Image: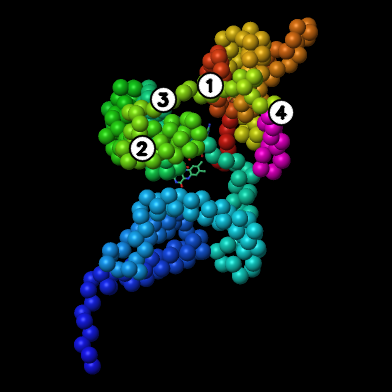
C-alpha cells in the first residue's frame, strides 16, 4: 500500500469549514422550525464563508469582502420578502394541520386575542440624549418610561431590568437613611451612568437622529456610527422637537387618506377610551391648560387645521360650531384624557400644558 502524504492543515480546513457551515445552517433551520429565532446569524456565517478560505485552495470562493457585504444587504431584503410571501401563502395551512406539533392554531388565536385586547406597544426611540432627569423627590424613572432603549437593536428589556435593579438598590439605601429627597435618589443617576447601561446607549446615541432625512441617509449614518463608536459625522446630531415636525395645511397633499377603524384590530377613539378604563372626578378644573384660545380658534385653524383633533387618541379636543354663529370653537372633553401627554409635546404653538388632574383620575389599564 502506498504511503499517503500527511494532510496539511489547509487541506483539512476547507472541508471542515464547509461541513460546519452546512451543519450550522441545518441546526438553525431546525431551531427555526421548532419555534426558536436566531435572526441574522445565518447571514453573518454565510458572509464569512463566502469571503474566507485559504488562498492556495482554488475551490474556495474568495469573494471580495465589500462585494459580499453589499450582496448580503440585498440578500437580506429579498430573503425577508420571500419569507413573508411564503408565510402568508403557506403559513395558515401549516397552523391548521392537526399533526403540526409546535405550530398550533390555538397559539395563533391566543396571540390574536392579546393584540385585540391590548393593541400595539409604542417604542421610545429618542436615545441617550432624550433621557430626562431620572430622579426626583420620592420617585425614580426606569425602563422605557425614561427612554432606556437601544433603538439600533430594538431591545430594551435588559435595560429595563438593569435600571430597575439599580433603582431598587437606590431606594433601599434611601429608605435606610430615611431620606427620599431628589438629592438622595440622584444616586440612581450616578449608578446607571457608571454601569453598562450608559456604555451601551452611548454607542447608539445618534442612531435615531440619523434617520431624520429618510431611510437611505439613515442607513448611511447608521453605518458610519457603527464604525465610529456612535459618533458618525458629528459628535451630537441635532434633534428637532416633535412639534417642529408638524406640517402646515399648505404642505399637506390633497385628499390625505383617513384610517377607518375595522372594529377588530383598529378601533374608534371612544372605544379605546372605554377600553382604557379612564375615569376622572367630575366638576374639577380642566387639567389641560390652554394658554391662548384665540390661537386655537383662528390662527391654528387656518395654518394647521387644528391637529389636536387628530393626534389626541382620546377625542379630547373637538372643534364645534359656536352657538352665536361666530365660527368654530375649541371644546375640551377633559374627562376622556388617557394622560399620554401627546398634546403637550405635539401642539405646534406649544400652548397646551398637561397638568395632573385632581383626585388621582385617569386610565386604569386593569389587567394590563
Ligand atoms: C414591537 C416591539 C418589539 C420589541 N422587541 C424587543 C426584543 O426583542 N428584545 C428586547 O429586549 N426589547 C424589545 N422591545 C422593547 C421592550 O419591549 C421594552 O424596552 C421593555 O418592555 C420595557 O420594559 P418596561 O418595564 O420599562 O415597560 P413596559 O414593558 O412597557 O411596561 C410598562 C407597564 O406599565 C403599564 N402601565 C402604563 N401606564 C399605566 C398606568 N397609568 N397604570 C398602570 N399601569 C400602567 C403598562 O400597561 C405596562 O404593562 C420591543 C418593543 C416593541 C414595541
Ligand atoms: S394627554 Fe393625550 S389623551 Fe390627554 S388630551 Fe392630551 S393628547 Fe389627548
The stretch in magenta equals 255-271
Q: Earlier in the sequence, mark 2 or mark 4?
A: 2
Number of residues whose C-alpha sits closer than 10 Å to that of mark 2, classed few (under 14), some (14–19) or many (20 or more): many
Q: Which residue is mark 1?
A: 243
Q: Assess mark 4: CB under 8 A from ligand 2?
A: no
Which image quadrant: the C terminus?
top right
* Residue 204 screen position, x and y as percent: 37, 37
Q: Which residue is mark 3?
A: 238
- Whether 255 is drawn above or below 34: the answer is above
Compare residues 43 and 351 and report the one nearer the observer: 43
Compare residues 164 and 203 and report the one nearer the observer: 203
Report how far apart the C-alphas of labels 1 and 4 lie in the structure: 22 Å
In the rendered structure, find residue 225 and report the number of the disc placed on it.
Answer: 2
Instruction: Give the secondary structure at mark 2.
Output: helix
User: Of tags 1 and 2, which is closer to the observer?
Assistant: 2
Report how far apart the C-alphas of labels 2 and 4 lie in the structure: 39 Å
Instruction: Give the secondary structure at mark 1.
Output: helix
Report how far apart the C-alphas of labels 2 and 3 lie in the structure: 15 Å
Number of residues whose C-alpha sits closer than 10 Å to that of mark 3, classed few (under 14), some (14–19) or many (20 or more): few
Disc 2 to disc 3: CB gap under 8 Å: no
Compare residues 76 and 293 and report the one nearer the observer: 76
Compare residues 27 and 1 and report the one nearer the observer: 1
Magenta: main secondary structure equals loop
Which image quadrant: the N terminus?
bottom left
Instruction: Give the secondary structure at mark 4.
Output: loop
Residue at figure coordinates x 45%, y 42% from the top left: 154
User: Of tags 3 and 1, which is closer to the observer?
Assistant: 3
Amino acid at each position: 500500500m502506498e504511503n499517503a502524504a500527511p494532510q496539511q492543515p489547509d487541506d483539512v480546513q476547507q472541508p471542515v469549514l464547509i461541513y460546519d457551515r452546512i451543519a450550522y445552517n441545518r441546526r438553525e433551520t431546525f431551531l427555526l422550525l421548532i419555534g426558536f429565532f436566531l435572526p441574522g446569524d445565518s447571514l453573518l456565517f454565510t458572509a464569512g464563508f463566502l469571503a474566507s478560505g485559504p488562498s492556495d485552495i482554488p475551490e474556495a470562493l474568495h469573494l471580495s469582502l465589500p462585494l459580499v457585504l453589499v450582496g448580503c444587504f440585498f440578500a437580506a431584503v429579498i430573503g425577508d420578502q420571500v419569507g413573508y410571501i411564503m408565510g402568508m401563502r403557506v403559513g395558515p395551512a401549516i397552523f391548521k394541520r392537526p399533526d403540526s406539533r409546535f405550530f398550533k392554531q390555538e397559539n395563533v388565536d391566543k396571540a390574536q386575542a392579546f393584540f385585540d385586547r391590548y393593541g400595539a406597544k409604542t417604542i421610545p426611540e429618542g436615545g441617550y440624549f432624550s433621557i430626562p432627569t431620572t430622579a426626583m423627590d420620592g420617585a425614580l424613572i426606569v425602563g422605557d418610561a425614561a427612554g432606556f432603549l437601544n433603538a439600533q437593536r430594538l431591545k430594551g428589556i435588559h435595560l429595563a431590568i438593569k435600571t430597575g435593579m439599580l433603582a431598587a438598590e437606590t431606594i433601599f439605601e434611601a429608605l435606610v437613611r430615611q431620606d427620599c429627597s431628589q438629592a438622595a435618589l440622584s444616586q440612581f443617576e450616578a449608578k446607571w451612568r457608571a454601569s453598562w447601561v450608559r456604555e451601551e446607549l452611548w454607542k447608539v446615541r445618534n442612531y435615531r437622529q440619523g434617520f431624520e432625512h429618510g431611510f437611505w441617509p439613515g442607513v448611511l449614518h447608521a453605518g458610519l456610527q457603527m464604525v465610529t463608536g456612535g459618533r458618525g459625522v458629528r459628535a451630537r446630531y441635532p434633534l428637532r422637537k416633535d412639534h417642529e415636525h408638524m406640517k402646515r395645511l399648505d404642505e399637506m397633499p390633497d385628499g390625505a387618506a383617513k384610517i377607518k377603524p375595522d372594529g377588530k384590530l383598529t378601533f374608534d377613539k371612544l372605544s379605546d377610551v372605554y377600553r382604557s378604563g379612564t375615569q376622572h372626578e367630575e366638576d374639577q378644573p380642566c387639567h389641560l391648560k390652554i394658554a391662548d384660545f384665540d390661537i386655537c380658534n383662528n390662527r391654528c385653524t387656518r395654518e394647521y387645521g387644528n391637529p389636536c383633533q387628530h393626534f389626541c387618541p382620546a377625542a379630547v379636543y373637538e372643534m364645534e360650531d359656536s352657538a352665536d354663529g361666530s365660527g368654530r370653537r375649541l371644546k375640551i372633553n377633559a374627562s376622556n384624557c388617557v394622560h399620554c401627554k401627546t398634546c403637550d409635546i405635539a401642539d405646534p404653538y406649544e400652548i397646551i400644558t398637561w397638568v395632573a388632574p385632581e383626585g388621582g383620575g385617569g386610565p386604569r389599564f386593569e389587567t394590563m
